[in-house]
Every structure is written in C-alpha cells, then in structure tokens.
Image (cartoon, rainbow, N blue to C red):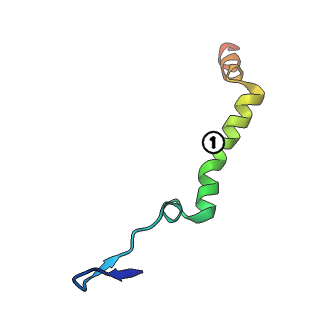
Amino acid sequence: MRRASADGTQQPRRKNLLEQWGGTSGMIYMTLPVVAFAVANSLLGLDGARSHSSAR
C-alpha cells in the first residue's frame, strides 16, 4: 500500500511491528522455541546437558 506525501509523490507505507514479524502466526513461530526452552529448562534444568556430556 502506498500513501501520498505532502509533495504528491507516492511513498511506501511503513509496516508495523506485527507485520514485520510475519503477522500473528510469525509471532507464534518466533516465540514458541523460547517458551519451549524456558519450560524444558525449568523442568530439567541446565544440569541435564552437563550430565550427558560428562557420562562419556
């Protein structure tokens, strides 16, 4: 979508933040890994990764 400026030329409309993230679905896809990590970290803690690496 374009809008007219004061001198009559057409300029592209700036996208708002939600549109830049890809809409609602883009925001969900972006936040889902963060939420999944936070839940897994609270349940398992970061010690889970350390115990697997030291088991070798």
The residue nearer to you, when weighing 8 against 38, is: 8
**Residue 8 location (% of width, % of height):** 25, 86
Q: Please, which residue is most extreme toward the bottom here?
A: 8
**Residue 47 location (% of width, % of height):** 69, 19
Q: Residue at x 21, y 83 (%)?
A: 7
Q: Residue at x 60, y 57 (%)?
A: 27
Q: Secondary structure at mark 1?
A: helix
2, above or below 19, in the image: below
Q: Please, which residue is most extreme toward the right here?
A: 43
**Residue 15 location (% of width, % of height):** 44, 67
Q: What residue sits right under mark 1 in the picture?
A: 34
Locate the N terminus by quadrant: bottom left
Locate the C terminus by quadrant: top right
**Residue 55 location (% of width, % of height):** 70, 14
23, above or below 39, in the image: below
1, above or below 51, in the image: below
**Residue 23 horizontal side relative to residue 46, left or right:** left
Quadrant of residue 36 in the image?
Answer: top right
Q: Residue at x 66, y 48 (%)?
A: 32
10, above or below 15, in the image: below
**Residue 13 horizontal side relative to residue 25, left or right:** left
Q: Residue at x 39, y 69 (%)?
A: 14
Quadrant of residue 3 in the image?
Answer: bottom left
Question: How many callouts does the rendering have?
Answer: 1
Q: Amino acid at mark 1?
A: Val
Q: Please, which residue is most extreme toward the left here?
A: 7
The residue nearer to you, when weighing 3 against 38, is: 3
Q: Residues within 10 Å of mark 1 (few under 14, many from 20)?
A: few
